[in-house]
Amino acid sequence: MILTHNWQHKFLILTLVFFVATLLVVAESLSISYKEALIFYEEKNLLHYLTQFSTSVFGQNSIALRLPFIILYTLSVLLMYQMTHNYFKNDNDRLISILIFMFLPGIIGASLLVNNSIVVIFCITLY
């Protein structure tokens, strides 16, 4: 059965929403690490300002600390979906490539940790 483009789009959005909800649940159970605490309290870089802004808006909790990186993950997936339109003739191939990108362990880990990697991934997909 060949999936229609509209059905694939809805499936991708539903999968992304489910996966972001899962990331939020996992982020709630993670406590701050030593390196993340150094970034949050002492260092003055982009990560510091992202986490400070998020915790000032949403309060000081684990989800607020990791929310900017989960948002960057979501935007990276959406940008990758937009980019693959020109690379794949078959919409099924496009959907499979985005699902593989979403479930890469490095991408998932980068979206849950306070580090530069998800910012770099977002900037690369933006470029």
Image: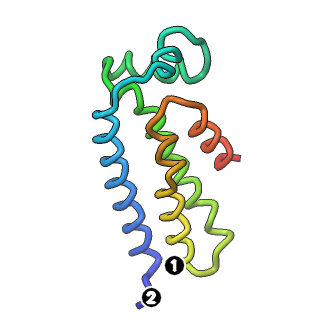
Q: Residue at x 47, y 34 (%)?
A: 113
The image position of residue 9, as x and y in percent, is: 43, 68
- Single out the residue that lies furthest toward the front: 34
Amino acid type, residue under disc 1 in the picture: Asn
Amino acid type, residue under disc 2 in the picture: Ile
Q: CB under 8 Å between callouts 2 and 1?
A: yes
- Single out the residue that lies furthest toward the top: 42
Q: Residue at x 68, y 46 (%)?
A: 124
Q: Residue at x 28, y 34 (%)?
A: 29
Where is mark 2, residue-wise?
Answer: 2
Q: Secondary structure at mark 2?
A: loop
Q: Is residue 110 left or right of residue 20?
A: right
The image position of residue 101, as x and y in percent, is: 54, 59
Where is mark 1, residue-wise?
Answer: 92
Relative depth, front residue between 118 and 83: 118
The image position of residue 75, as x and y in percent, is: 51, 46
- Single out the residue that lies furthest toward the right: 127
Relative depth, front residue between 90 and 27: 27
The chosen color scheme is rainbow
Residue 53, compared with residue 117, is above or below; it is above
Relative depth, front residue between 34 and 58: 34
Quarter of the rendering occupied by the N terminus: bottom left
Q: Secondary structure at mark 1?
A: helix
Mark 2 vs 1, N-terminal side: 2
Residue 55 quadrant: top left
**Dot 2, how many residues are within 10 Å of its Cα: few (below 14), some (14-19), or many (20+)?**
few
Q: Residue at x 55, y 30 (%)?
A: 115
Q: Calculate the distance from the C-alpha at mark 2 to the C-alpha at mark 1.
A: 8 Å
Q: Exactly how many numbered labels are in the figure?
A: 2
Q: Is residue 44 left or right of residue 6?
A: right
